[in-house]
Amino acid sequence: MTNRLTALFGGTFDPIHYGHLLPVIALAKEIRLTHISLLPNHIPPHKAQPEATTNQRVEMLKLAVENYPFLSIDMREITETRLDRPSYTIDTLKAWRHENGNTQGLAFILGQDSLLNLTSWNNWQALLDYCHLLICRRPGYTDSPDDKDFKQWIALHQTNDINQLHQYANGFIYFANTPLENISATEIRQQITNKKSCEALLPSNVWNYIQTNHLYGA
Ligand code: ATP
């Protein structure tokens, strides 16, 4: 049995919403996670920028986690990444292992849409050398990619046994039975720009922050 299983949930969080929160809350219960760290990513200056600044994205995360004691924020991608390049998940995982050693359990949480994109990630095949992948369901996205090799790679590493996630430090892919939440940050930003309320889609303190700071054209 490894020590406590640490779970990182990476994203742009522009803004954080219930499509992020409700699945990971359910996931924590489903697989007995005591703690999840939200990992806001760094976006280099030459890439398409989030609409909120990094500081604003982090402020919204801080507000969101106030309501959920088992959530915290891991700032490493924002504080440690070189300004001219994106935060590659593989580098973050390596850095985490460097700090915490190889025997402790580490998991990285993804929505199904992100899993379908995984083969475009830097050194994606090596991800499982450092962590487990925990996949949350997302409406509109299949759990089975078209690419035959990728499908085989998933099948090779997939487990339905929660105990394996706790017994081994890395190496497994787990498809969680999390609730389907039809919410996306892109849609929230568009709705706010169009002066529509999406108060029900995110925590009220985050909604208030968006209004007070006139984010996304509010
Ligand atoms: P955008 O609409 O701007 O692309 P997003 O809502 O997908 O943003 P991100 O911050 O890019 O949010 O996503 C962070 C992680 O959360 C990703 O792994 C993504 O797959 C997952 N995620 C986002 N929304 C949902 C949702 N509604 N259900 C399940 N997973 C989600």
Image (cartoon, grey):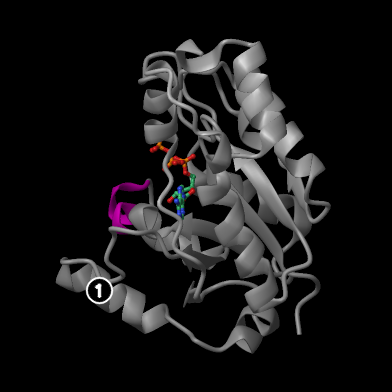
Q: Residue at x 70, y 50 (%)?
A: 37
Provide the major secondary structure of the magenta segment.
helix
- Residue 82 location, x and y as percent? 56, 23
Whether the magenta-drawn stretch holds residue 117 is answered as yes
Q: Is residue 175 left or right of residue 105?
A: left
Amino acid bearing label 1: Lys
Q: Is residue 198 left or right of residue 156?
A: right
- Residue 167 location, x and y as percent? 68, 84
Residue 79 visible here: no
In this view, 199 is above or below 130: above
Mark 1 neighbour class, 10 Å CA radius: few under 14, some 14 to 19, many 20 or more: some
Q: Secondary structure at mark 1?
A: helix
- Image quarter for residue 213? top right
User: Which quarter of the image is occupied by the N terminus?
Assistant: bottom right
Callout 1: CB less than 8 Å from ligand 1: no
- Residue 149 location, x and y as percent? 20, 71
Q: Is residue 20 left or right of residue 74?
A: left
Give the residues drawn in magenta, as a range: 116-121
Name the residue tied to disc 1: 151
Q: Residue at x 53, y 18 (%)?
A: 52
Q: Nearer the viewer, residue 123 or 159?
A: 159
Label count reads: 1
Q: Residue at x 75, y 43 (%)?
A: 65
Q: Is residue 183 left or right of residue 162?
A: left
